[in-house]
């Protein structure tokens, strides 16, 4: 960190290589300019050594060791603030810390000057921040845009509003992941600006048009107060990027819970059978499917209040419980900041209505809610996210968000939070063939970018060949079954709403799924104790390992145009002579080939072949 000519900057180097050149620090608040004309007050160094447990992220136990540097700064009017840096082996986190400003007990941040200044020649792997009040029923931004890989910094974003966190970069020698964490009701969510020239990007606040103009774009909070943490993860390989725990290391639980939440798999009729399935009989079919698959949950999606009704829903929930299945119910987040007609609406945005609905759900034994169509990153919207989570916990309800912002440390902050979409997810494969055609490409992006910083509720693992009811018509799945099985491992979310359907249980000769695929989807876990990167490149291929208990799941996907043969060092996960279950592509059709007792001869040189749009899974 440096202070010169009235400006504070910081530099990041890794393994002797420059990751970020001098990058600006500071902000403009309603009480003064803390960017121009600042001077150094002093520095204090500390050590951090802490351990904590997670139940809904990529790892279950974290040992976080870092050096902390707290830098005091002041402006020409003697307004003082601090920058709190925390530096571990591969992660940097920093935030602004403000005390009371004389008689002032509150602050409004008008603009952040926080920047990230990359060396020349850096390439980018980014997704654009969309226009506001566009898309389905004017419900964007919803973090559902297309990624562009290996792009130059000079290439502008699609909409001219910068880029959605997280943001992946590649300098000549080092991979860099930018994101933010610890965003709650006391700040807005931010995104990365357009490239400003000479490698510089800065923090941008939400657009005024978001949420139909409701709420300010400028965060305001009581003093003393802090900004969220900005995080920088670096590595000469992609392992630190995939394995980072930076989103969780510097946040704390916002409230304790009295409930023992259980995580697991769920059936979900809407993803393949769509709106027409939102009736009593079809939901019974998916409850029965959950029972047959030993899934603990069913998600009943939009329109249930009109097509089934609250009174008959009680009957349906009782039936689900009789089959050993618990229920999640869909809600719209609002009605006043978009044009959404899917119901229930106007239930979650109002505290009085929300309490009535949640009391009703608690009485019936509902276990969770999926809340959709958020459409903004303003502080007012962050406050509503937190209110929904807090009220839901009072009633023993887990929460999934869809059409939403990136979760920023929420797996540790909120005990009943279980996942967010915030990605161009599986429903788009049903809506357009090009999304099916690009499924492998996306599967080779998200473990490096979106899903590495937070849970990702994708809702996939399709076993239908044709993504429509009856496995006929609709869009056509291009992937092999092994790719679909692999994504059940690659995509991390504590509650997984998988796209299995009743027709998958038919005999294969009658259009059902292969037994090997069904059995895998019955048994794959949804929570993980450890995650390790093995090999890959964003958008081309990915191989990673996740451990559940004592069992390793090693999964890979190939998005390249030809089959890919890899020789992998798996000595960390298997030993010579071990027997493992190995699912590989047939190379003649989409069915998986299962070797129930694959013998590991040389764990340092395990050879696997993946078809184009294919994959593999090894279970040991």
Image: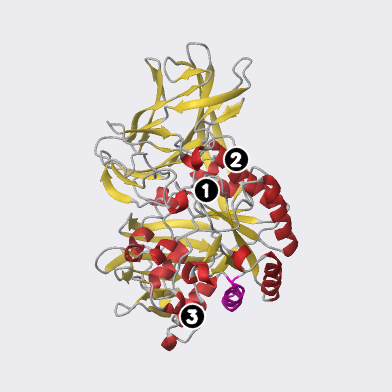
Separation of residues labelled 2 and 1 (CA atoms): 12 Å
How crowded pointer 2 is (Cα within 10 Å; few <14, some 14-19, many 20+) is rated as some
Q: Is residue 294 magenta?
A: yes
Separation of residues labelled 1 and 3 (CA atoms): 33 Å
Q: Residue at 59% across / 66% down in the picture? A: 300
Q: Position of residue 337 (x, y in %)?
A: 53, 45
Disc 1 marks which residue?
A: 374
Q: Residue at 33% across / 39% down in the picture? A: 160
Q: Position of residue 346 (x, y in %)?
A: 61, 51
Q: Position of residue 394 (x, y in %)?
A: 72, 51
Q: Tell me the magenta residue range.
A: 279-295
How crowded pointer 3 is (Cα within 10 Å; few <14, some 14-19, many 20+) is rated as some
How crowded pointer 1 is (Cα within 10 Å; few <14, some 14-19, many 20+) is rated as many
- Residue 40 to residue 542: above or below: above
The label shown at residue 383 is 2
Mark 1 or mark 3, which is nearer to you? 1
Disc 3 marks which residue?
A: 503
Give the image quarter of residue 386: top right
- Residue 420 to residue 518: above or below: above
What is the image's colouring? secondary structure
């Amino acid at each position: 960190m440096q202070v010169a000519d009235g400006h504070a900057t910081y530099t990041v180097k890794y393994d002797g290589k420059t990751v970020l050149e001098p990058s600006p620090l500071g902000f403009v608040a309603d009480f003064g300019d803390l960017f121009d004309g600042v001077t150094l007050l002093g520095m204090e160094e500390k050590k951090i050594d802490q351990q904590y447990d997670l139940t809904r992220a990529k790892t279950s136990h974290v040992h976080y060791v870092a050096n902390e540097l707290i830098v005091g700064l002041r402006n020409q009017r003697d307004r003082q603030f601090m920058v709190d840096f925390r530096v571990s082996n591969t992660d940097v986190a920093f935030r602004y810390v403000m005390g009371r400003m004389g008689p002032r007990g509150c602050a409004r941040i008008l603009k952040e000057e926080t920047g990230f200044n990359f060396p020349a020649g850096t390439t980018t792997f980014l997704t654009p921040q969309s226009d506001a009040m566009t898309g389905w029923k004017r419900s964007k931004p919803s973090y559902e845009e297309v990624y562009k890989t290996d792009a130059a910094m000079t290439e502008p974003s699609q909409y001219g509003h910068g880029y959605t966190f997280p943001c992946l970069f590649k300098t000549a020698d080092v991979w860099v992941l930018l994101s933010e964490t610890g965003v709650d009701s006391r700040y807005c969510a931010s995104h990365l600006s357009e490239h400003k020239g000479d490698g510089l990007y800065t923090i941008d606040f939400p657009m005024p048009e978001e949420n139909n103009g409701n709420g300010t774009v400028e965060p305001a909070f009581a003093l003393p107060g802090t900004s969220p943490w900005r995080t920088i993860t670096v590595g000469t390989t992609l392992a630190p990027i995939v394995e980072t725990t930076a989103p969780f290391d510097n946040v704390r639980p916002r409230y304790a819970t009295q409930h023992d939440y259980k995580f697991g798999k769920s059936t979900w009729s809407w993803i393949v059978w769509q709106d027409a399935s939102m009736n009593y009989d079809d939901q019974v079919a998916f409850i029965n499917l959950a029972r047959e698959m030993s899934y603990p949950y069913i998600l009943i999606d939009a329109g249930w209040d009109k097509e089934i009704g609250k009174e008959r829903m009680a009957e349906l929930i009782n039936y689900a419980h009789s089959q050993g299945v618990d229920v999640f119910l869909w809600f719209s987040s609002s009605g006043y900041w978009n044009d959404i007609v899917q119901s229930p609406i106007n239930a979650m945005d109002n505290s009085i209505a929300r309490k009535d609905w949640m009391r009703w759900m608690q009485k019936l034994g509902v276990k969770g809610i999926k809340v959709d169509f958020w459409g903004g990153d303003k502080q007012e919207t962050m406050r509503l996210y937190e209110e929904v989570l807090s009220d839901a916990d009072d009633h023993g309800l887990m929460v999934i968000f869809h059409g939403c912002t990136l979760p920023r440390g929420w797996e540790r902050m909120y005990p009943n939070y279980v996942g967010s979409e915030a990605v161009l997810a599986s429903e788009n494969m049903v809506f357009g063939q090009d999304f099916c055609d690009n499924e492998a490409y996306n599967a080779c992006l998200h473990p490096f970018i979106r899903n590495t910083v937070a849970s990702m509720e994708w809702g996939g693992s399709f076993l239908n060949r044709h993504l429509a009811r009856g496995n006929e018509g609709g869009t056509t799945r291009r992937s092999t079954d092994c790719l679909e099985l692999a994504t059940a491992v690659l995509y991390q979310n504590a509650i997984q709403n998988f796209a299995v359907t009743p027709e998958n249980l038919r005999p294969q000769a009658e259009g059902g799924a292969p037994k090997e695929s069904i059995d895998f989807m019955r048994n794959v876990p949804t929570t993980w104790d450890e995650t390790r990167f093995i090999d890959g490149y964003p958008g081309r291929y990915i191989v990673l390992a996740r451990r559940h208990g004592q069992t390793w799941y090693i999964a890979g996907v190939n998005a390249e145009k030809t089959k890919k043969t890899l020789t992998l060092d798996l000595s960390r996960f298997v030993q010579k002579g071990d027997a493992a279950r190995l699912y590989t592509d047939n190379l003649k059709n989409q069915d998986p080939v299962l070797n129930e007792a694959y013998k590991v001869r040389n764990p340092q040189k395990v050879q696997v072949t993946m078809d184009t749009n294919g994959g593999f899974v090894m279970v040991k």
